[in-house]
Amino acid sequence: MLPSLTVSFIVGLLVGSQIPYFPLSASFFLFLSALGAFILERLNRFSVRQASWLYGALLVGVVYWSVAVNLTAHDPMIEQSIDAVIDVTGRIVAPVQPAPDRLVMVIRSDNPIPVSGPSGHIRLTWRTPDRMFFQGDRVGFRAMLRSPSGSLNPGGFDYAVYLERQGIDAIATVTGSEAVEFLESGRANAWWTIWNQFDRWRSSIRLAALQTLPQPALGLYVGIIIGDRGYLGPDLRDQFMATGTVHLLSISGSHLGLVALLVFAVVRWVMIVLPADWLLAMTRRITPTRIAAVCTFVPVAGYAFLAGAELATTRSLLMVTVGLSAIWLGQERRLFHALSAAALAILLHDPQALFDISFQLFFLSVFALAGWLSWPATHEGQTLPNEPSLLKSCARWGRDAIVMSGVVTVVTLPLVAYYFNQLPWLGLLANVVAVPVMGILLVPIGLGAGIWQIIVGGNLLPLASLNQWFLEHFVAAVRLVSMLPGVEWHVAAPSALTMVTFYSCLALLWWRVGGTAFRSATGAGVLLLLLWWAWSPRMFLDGDHFRVTFLDVGQGDSAVVELPDGQVVLIDGGATYERFDMGRGVVAPFLWNRGIRIIDQVIGTHPQLDHVGGLAWVIRHFVVKNYWGSGETREEVFYRRLQHSLATQGLQEGVAREG
């Protein structure tokens, strides 16, 4: 019953989130839900008690969202700043995020600030820092504060909302040595001592890796071991995305799960190989499985805290904790109940997590695996021999791994297409190899080296040569696979209606609703939707009208002109920054969502970063027929990158002159 109640509660949260925008539609949905529950009860599909519980859970979700989110929401952030530079003192309340030539800190101000929201948290970026700070330290700085601002592009990534979800009320930037003053160590506060120490351990591992590992091994190592993604290059991220393995770059369920599985297996094996009389005496009080469950939690929790305990990592730790608790209670086969309990705990703490991509992908993947493993058809007709050979066992494991990878890829495909405009079809095979390599080799060896460095100290990372060899070969394999034709398959974001239809068809197939003909039609519907998303045709042309769309790229310009004959003209592409490319993050998604893959004319009005910086990425990933510029040249990196993209695509810059 718990999984059904959880689903009803989630539906209630969804309805509650829409009440401020569509109150009549939400009320009509509640009426239809009540009517549906009554009909199912009359048809003897549910008892009166079950229908009452399910509808009650739905209403609780609506009320909980209204109370926890709608009533406590403050006015939307608008970009504002004060005219004067002010002094701010406060405590660092989140792990410090370092990157080349920069530190990013979240500081809780001691006093109210002019642009403060309810929490008083400031996201401070310190460029060219001259020292390191840690979580819990008190610091002071002088800066001009401003509220975060997001883009105005419908359906695009909204930076202001993202920071608001993290509790950030203001942002600031300082530059140069001694721009941030150290006031007090986090070790002086009893509450912050342990977090300060974990941050120091992370810094020690990071500095040792910087001294001993070159790129790209460095970026991958600090990303998968201590959660620092600031050293990962954008090209490497794109290659992992194309191969469907981008989830390996963040410490989440796969990392913690594999570490937990490895520790659990080792501890349980050690318990079993103990002398027989020891084992017999021990099992009178506690089983080896329970001991393994308890011993597994400590290293997994330590790994999560060492990685910075970010949101996705914390959720994964909660899932592992629920799983270990189920093993302790002897309920490890009740997967759906454990997953439902974890989802409820997260949503009760933060209802808005329901709209977080990490929450959606993680639980959808795990529910898909649990559903597949519990589906009766997966066990029908399978008879295991009394003494299976090693070859047959390996073949069976390989088959099961491919099938489960395929299940996860298909089930998460709509969400990946919606958020990233991409179909990572190669992940079906790539994850079968990449996930075990990451969990059995890269993470254990890298984590062992990091723990060794913490214990022994020094400026060099232990096992640096071994880590570098494995990491570089792993990156080389990903790059090689990402160069295969058709790997990078960009699509339009699916509509909400088609996504609901897709998952409804999957649910009908899993529940085996209807006869053979109905199930065949349902399966055909799933296949047709997949083919439609993969095709993503250009639709809704404007006939004999022009369509001009001005994209919000912050500082700079970008405009898309769609002509009556179907031609597309792109004028400028915004800027490209160290961590965000307007061409990749704003211009390209708009074009994909319009079904545009061919650009007839690309125009760079003048060679400045905020106008042509984003064009380099667009030219590399779209079919461009002509490029026009002003004839001016620059020596900066962004212009050389643009020239390289043109040369790679075999394009010559045409010069547009007056007349």
Image: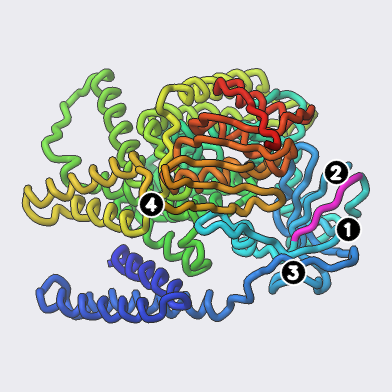
How far apart, in angstroms, are the residues tagged by discs 2 and 3? 24 Å
For the stretch drawn in magenta, what is the main secondary structure?
strand
Task: Assign a secondary structure to mark 4.
Answer: loop
Q: Position of residue 395 (x, y in %)?
A: 27, 23
Residue topped by disc 1: 141
Do the CB atoms of the residues marked 2 and 3 lie less than 8 Å apart?
A: no
**Observer-nearest residue: 293 or 486?**
486
Q: Tell me which label, 4 or 2, sits earlier in the chain.
A: 2
Residue topped by disc 3: 120
Q: Amino acid at mark 4?
A: Gly
How far apart, in angstroms, are the residues tagged by discs 4 and 1? 57 Å
Q: Image check: 380 left or right of 477?
A: left
Q: Position of residue 470 (x, y in %)?
A: 57, 21
> How was this image coloured?
rainbow
Q: Is residue 162 above or below residue 286?
A: below
Span of residues in magenta:
171-176
* Residue at 51%, 54% in the rendered image: 315
State which quarter of the image contains the C terminus. Answer: top right
Q: Position of residue 324 (x, y in %)?
A: 43, 51
Q: In the figure, residue 190 lies in which quadrant? A: bottom right
Q: Tell me which label, 4 or 1, sits earlier in the chain.
A: 1
**Observer-nearest residue: 458 or 28?**
28
Residue topped by disc 4: 543
How far apart, in angstroms, are the residues tagged by discs 1 and 2? 13 Å
* Residue at 36%, 40% in the rendered image: 409
Residue located farthest toward the right when viewing the structure as drawn:
178
Do the CB atoms of the residues marked 3 and 1 lie less than 8 Å apart?
A: no
Residue topped by disc 2: 129
Q: Is residue 501 above or below residue 73?
A: above
How far apart, in angstroms, are the residues tagged by discs 4 and 3? 51 Å
